[in-house]
Image (cartoon, grey):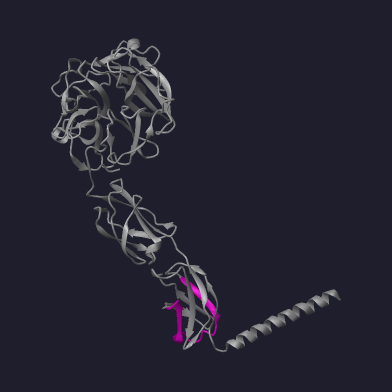
Amino acid sequence: MKNINITLLLATMVFFLFSCSREEDSALGDRPSIRMVSPALAFPGEEVTITGLNFGNSSSIEVFFEEKSVEIVSSSAESIVVIVPSISPTDKETARVQVKVDDRKSNQYLFRYDYAQPILDEVPLTFEQGEAIELKGSGFGERLDQVNVLFGGIPATISSLTDEAIELKVPDYAGRVKVDVVVTVKAKSSEPVSARYTNVSYKNPVFAESRPDPTVIKAQDGWFYLYATEDVRNMPIMRSKDLATWESVGTAFTDVTRPTFEPNGGLWAPDINYINGKYVLYYSMSVWGGEQTCGIGVAIADSPQGPFVDKGKLFRSNEIGVQNSIDPNYVEDDGKKYLFWGSFRGIYMIELSDDGLSVKTGAVKKQVAGTYFEGVYVHKRDGYYYMFASIGSCCNGVNSTYQLIVARATNLAGPYYNKSGYDMMNEGRTLILDKNATFVGNGHCSEIVQDAEGKDWVLYHGIQTSNPNGRVLLLDEVKWDDAGWPYFTGGSPSLTAPVPVF
């Protein structure tokens, strides 16, 4: 009996719903009615299907999104396929959809626009900052308030927009000559397209505050990091994407963590390296005139920004028997680790332990250059070892006579000869960087860095004659002649030059 009652109840409900539906449809008469738009969330240019009743003859149908008539792909009495129109800058993110058959209008159905990932097809491969260019693709929409174009992370100014084209003004130099261009529509971004600036130059100095004796490394995070003699206490750290634009990011040490083996000493002439997964910073510690008590120490960090943990001194002058033991330069060669050092009392080298944090047990120092040099940097290229070094006075303002010289060898331990065949043990050297009217006292170069176009670049310090307070940071390209010798254009610091490409 119970089952019979349930069956009767269900039958009654079905009859009631059917009757209501017929009554509702009857009440509509021949007026069109929208029941659904599917999908209810779609991107401009996509097809959506409108389902309902009384759509009638296809020749008399119109479909509107708000008041915009849209393209009809196909239709029947109960469904219409249309193309979602582009959204204009004045449109909202939703649209009221309405079907009109002859002069009869349907109810309004609320539709919401979606945003697919925009596609960037065409970008000029080169451009100048400030240049007006056009990007082509699809899925850009037509709403300026929802579209951004970034050049290396720097936003451009859009002048006009359609769903398939963007006209804009290239922003000023975005920090790198080679940049990724990305279009973002709401939260969805295109795949990046690589392009480059062509009219970007830097001016020397690239950093106008005193940053003597620079050392540089490209870190695992993609930034270049630079360390320098502590004209900023505790040894300044700076970073750059292109070697030409620098920002300060702190110091290697603090008053609490700074080395102490020379209690009143300054931290000079660092040398940064990446060894066994650690950032290893060699440093000099000395006071002016303290040539027997100065020495070289080492600190390590997991990040190029520190914190650096001091591992103490490698040696002092009076311990290793080399007066004025400063200006370290770490070199790896044939699976072994070495340290070069010295300042106007001879240039020496010695083998280090496998971790680079101490002198190798039983290692014996070897002199490789005479007493005319300091601030050495050894660079290997095409079978030669090039020893860059500085001569003259570094720190007498506009009267400074510092110069950068070079010699080369076929063996890391020398002998190192200049172009004329004279040995550095007998003061042989080839001058490659001298003064000009703008910069004097130029020298103590960093490591050579090669850019994406195969050009070699080096940082060094100099004194600006118009403002001789401190030793400012300079950048120049190192070029190579047919015989394999390095040189600088004009033999002195450039005033302006094209920015390196990375």
Does the magenta-highlighted stretch encompass residue 230? no
In front here: 463 or 384? 463
Residue 485 visible to the viewer: no
Say which quarter of the image contains residue 53: bottom right
Classify 90 as above or below 462. Answer: below
Q: Which residues are magenta?
A: 47-67
Classify 47 as above or below 29. Answer: above
Residue sitting at x 55%, y 89%: 30
Q: In which quadrant will I find the N terminus?
A: bottom right
The x, y position of residue 183, in whole percent, is: 37, 57
Residue sitting at x 52%, y 71%: 38
The x, y position of residue 83, in whole percent, is: 44, 73
Classify 253 as above or below 453. Answer: above
Residue 67 visible to the viewer: yes
Does the magenta-highlighted stretch encompass residue 60? yes
The x, y position of residue 139, in whole percent, is: 40, 64
In front here: 81 or 173? 173
The x, y position of residue 146, in whole percent, is: 40, 62
Q: In which quadrant will I find the C terminus?
A: top left
In front here: 287 or 371? 287
